Image: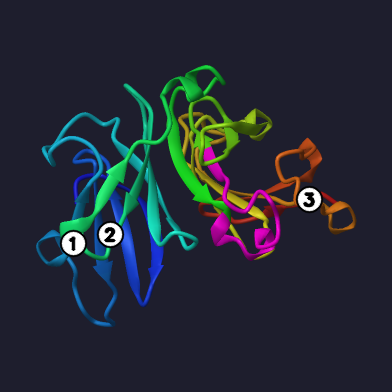
Amino acid sequence: AYDPEGVTYLGNNRFMIASERVRTGYVVTYVAGGLSNRLNSSAHVFAGNGDVLANDGLEGVCYDPSTNSIWGVKEKDPSATYQLINFETPQQSVITNPFHPRVYGNNGLDDLADVYCLSACPAFANSPRKNNLLILGQEDNKIMEITRTGQVVDILDISYLNRPQVEGITMDDDGVIYLVSEQVKTAAEGVSRFHVISPPPSTYTLQLLHLADEEAGEIVIGATTKQCMAE
């Protein structure tokens, strides 16, 4: 794939890999000892016509179990959100663009890096927020929670992490947020990092986007690995 940027699990040993420059998601099936490539994968073009384009395309994808669809985000120029419906039958698949780009620009997000569907998290099964999405803004250091009709619910400023390139987001079954950031150029912060954002159990109310700075922890990915968690 050209510049793979994202991955999501679809069930039954299947994954979708997001290829940024061709704006395409490839559905591959994992077989131990096997090999998958673009020629034996089901391809879904989220934007454009599949040609190799600029480095501002499909950045992240997430499977939505509530609708058996896949959501994807385009980085910028313009930023966009897509929903891929009927991906299991490519001849009948449909890709929609449900949000106007202004929903991001008007809220300080100019560069999208990833998306997560709260429907994939069991902790939200009985919550009115279970159908909302989390949108990660890379250059803006923000996580936006948005409804499927484009209404912004909340925004978390993650600039306190002091990481200019946070590019991936996911959750575990308890609703803990995990982020990954690329390496940066300064010597002190030159390693990639894995960040954990978790509310204290005593105050856990599923309001995940109202977190104090001291509630975040991180693991440094490099020659030496350490964990720095709040007490």
CA gap between label 3 and label 2 equals 35 Å
Type of amino acid under label 1: Ser
Query: Left or right: where does residue 22 sit relative to residue 16?
Result: left
Residue named by callout 2: 87
Report the disc number at residue 42: 1
Q: Earlier in the sequence, mark 1 or mark 2?
A: 1
> How far from the left and from the top, in percent, is residue 132?
58, 46
CA gap between label 1 and label 2 equals 9 Å
1 or 2: mark nearer the eye: 2
Type of amino acid under label 2: Phe
Q: Classify mark 3: helix, strand or loop.
A: loop
3 or 1: mark nearer the eye: 1
Type of amino acid under label 3: Pro
CA gap between label 3 and label 1 equals 39 Å
Q: Earlier in the sequence, mark 3 or mark 2?
A: 2
At label 1, counting other C-alpha atoms closer than 10 Å, the crowd grade (few under 14, some 14-19, many 20 or more) is some
- How does the figure colour the protein chain or chains? rainbow
> How far from the left and from the top, in percent, is residue 6?
37, 50
Q: How many marks?
A: 3
Q: Classify mark 1: helix, strand or loop.
A: strand
Q: Earlier in the sequence, mark 3 or mark 1?
A: 1
Residue named by callout 3: 199
Query: Left or right: where does residue 112 sit relative to residue 56?
Result: right
Say whether residue 169 is visible: no
Residue range corresponding to the magenta coloring: 119-135
The one of 52 and 62 positioned closer to us in this rendering: 62
